[in-house]
Image: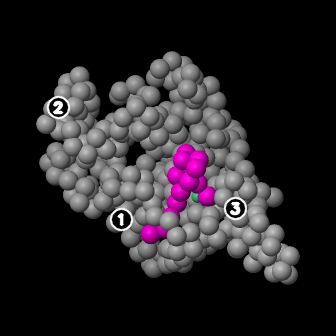
């Protein structure tokens, strides 16, 4: 079986613990869930549709009946699979959904470092991520997976307590910034191209015929400030919260509610101090411009849409 290995070094602790607040091992499921979250956003950012798998009622399903019927009608396995996958979004095609297996297995090995306990716990050190292609991963998926991991390393973070449920984490603790050695995966970058992948996800969206919910993370509306940090007071100020973290009365508009998040819904701004990085996401171009206005002077935002375009330029170079 083909396997590809990534070597990971944590820059800030990685958290893949349980709800009980313990992180005593690096859980593959935590890593995969987080990778998928970024992958979905990038699919949407390229103009595709990616379901939110946490909304069980509305997530994709492989069309087993359609697949079997196509086979009965004498179509090739490849064509029958295309029928079955017609209503399956790109994220589910790679990461799996009802009736369709994830295309790979992931195993963690060579863990070297420290798990610290308690509320500020997590793992610090190095480990290997071994990706086994249990089923064929399409070239376009390899390309997109590679770009996703590059984006996570350069602009994002991985694991829990960062993006999915940051309010679980103590203030001031920064989870999930990583360095990745991609040498074993570098050929994935030449498997396909920006234009092919973008064309494919747009075609897939037409077949599915659904729209992304405007509250879902779309990488076009991601923003990042490199080399800067916001402490809790800066953050409260930007979110129009008072010192105790309560909304200021005049600021209860939808935009601020979205940024702040609420019980069970993540806030949309994340700040890291070592190394310094602030990032977040909003719902449209107008809100991106609002963010740029709200940030202190000297905070230059880079937009997700421009990051995606730079992938196109790299591809053309
Ligand atoms: Zn899906």
Instruction: State how far apart marks 3 and 1 are (Cα).
Output: 30 Å
3D distance between C-alphas at marks 2 and 1: 32 Å
Instruction: Choose mark 2 or mark 1, whichever is in front.
Output: 2
Kindly indicate the quadrant of the structure image that contains residue 126: top right
Residue under numbered circle 1: 305
Whole-angstrom CA distance, mark 2 to mark 3, is 47 Å
- 29 to the left or right of 230: right
Whether the residues at callouts 2 and 3 have beta carbons within 8 Å, the answer is: no
Residue 89 position, x and y percent, is 58, 63
Q: Nearer the viewer, residue 317 or 220?
A: 220
Q: Which mark is residue 62?
A: 3
The magenta stretch spans which residues? 46-60
Q: Give the foreground label among 3 and 1.
A: 3
Q: Is mark 3 within 8 Å of ligand 1?
A: no
Q: Mark 2 falls on what kind of element?
A: loop
The residue that label 2 is drawn on is: 248
């Amino acid at each position: 079986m083909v396997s590809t290995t990534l070597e990971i070094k944590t820059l800030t602790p990685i958290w893949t613990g349980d709800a009980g607040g313990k992180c005593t091992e690096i859980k593959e499921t935590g890593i995969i869930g987080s990778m998928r979250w970024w992958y979905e956003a990038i699919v949407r950012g390229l103009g595709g549709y990616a379901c939110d798998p946490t909304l069980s009622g509305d997530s994709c399903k492989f069309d087993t009946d359609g697949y079997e019927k196509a086979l009965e009608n004498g179509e090739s396995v490849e064509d029958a699979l295309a029928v079955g996958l017609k209503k399956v979004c790109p994220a589910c095609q790679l990461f799996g959904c009802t009736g369709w297996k994830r295309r790979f297995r992931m195993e963690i090995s060579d863990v070297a470092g420290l798990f610290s306990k308690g509320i500020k716990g997590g793992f610090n050190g190095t480990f290997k991520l071994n990706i086994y292609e249990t089923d064929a991963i399409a070239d376009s998926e390899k390309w997109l997976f590679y770009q996703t991991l590059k984006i996570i390393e350069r602009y994002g973070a991985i694991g829990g307590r960062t993006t999915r449920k940051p309010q679980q984490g103590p203030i001031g603790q920064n989870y999930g910034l990583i360095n990745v050695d991609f040498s074993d995966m570098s050929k994935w970058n030449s498997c396909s191209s920006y234009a092919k992948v973008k064309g494919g996800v747009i075609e897939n969206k037409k077949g599915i015929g659904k729209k992304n919910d405007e509250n879902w993370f779309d990488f076009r509306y991601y923003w990042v400030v490199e080399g800067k940090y916001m402490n809790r007071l800066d953050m409260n100020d930007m979110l129009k919260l008072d010192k105790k973290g309560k909304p200021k009365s005049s600021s209860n508009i939808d935009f601020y509610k979205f940024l702040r998040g609420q019980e069970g819904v993540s806030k949309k701004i994340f700040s890291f101090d070592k190394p310094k990085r602030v990032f977040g996401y909003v719902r449209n171009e107008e809100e991106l411009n609002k963010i740029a206005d709200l940030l202190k002077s000297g905070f230059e935002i880079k937009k997700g849409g421009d990051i995606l375009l730079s992938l196109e330029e790299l591809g053309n170079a």
